[in-house]
Image (cartoon, grey):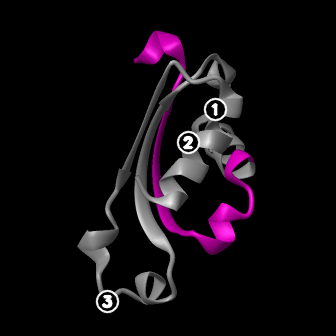
Amino acid sequence: MSDTLAQMEQRLAALAPSRLDIRDDSQLHAGHAGARAGGGHYHLTITSTQFSGLSRVARHRLVYQTLGDLMQTRIHALAIDALAPDES
């Protein structure tokens, strides 16, 4: 597992997810400007009670906030499927 994936998992643990899957899609974007600068492309599927009652935008903001500076340094693109337990 890459250092970035490990850091993402560690930080997202704060959301107490019942499901956490992170896929590194960086190889699909080789040569892309963000990839050249060192930022990876990831797909996140996360289920947490903390998403209950939140809009899709609010869920994404919570994920971005939780990942913090990784969003400006190690992550160039992040696709997010954020679900409440009754939606998964």
Q: Residue furthest top?
A: 86
Is residue 6 found inside the magenta-colored segment of the image?
no
Kind of element beneath mark 1? helix
Q: Residue at x 67, y 29 (%)?
A: 15
- Of callouts 1 and 3, which one flags the residue occurring earlier in the amino acid sequence? 1
Q: Position of residue 69 (x, y in %)?
A: 73, 64
Q: Which residue is mark 2?
A: 9
Q: Identify residue type, mark 3.
A: Gly
Vertical side of 34 occupied by 77: above or below:
above
Vertical side of 15 occupied by 81: above or below:
below
Label 1 and label 2: CA atoms lie apart by 6 Å
Nearest the camera: 7 or 58?
7
- Left or right of 65, for residue 41: left
Is residue 78 found inside the magenta-colored segment of the image?
yes
- Left or right of 22, for residue 63: right
Res 60 → quadrant: top right
Vertical side of 81 occupied by 23: above or below:
below
Q: Identify residue type, mark 2.
A: Glu
Instruction: Give the magenta-colored segment's residue range.
Output: 66-88
Closer to the eye: label 1 or 3: 1
Label 1 and label 3: CA atoms lie apart by 31 Å
Q: Residue at x 29, y 82 (%)?
A: 30
Label ID, residue 13: 1
Closer to the eye: label 2 or 3: 2
Q: Identify residue type, mark 1.
A: Ala
Are circles 1 and 2 on residues that touch, CB within 8 Å? yes
Q: Residues within 10 Å of mark 2 (few under 14, many from 20)?
A: some
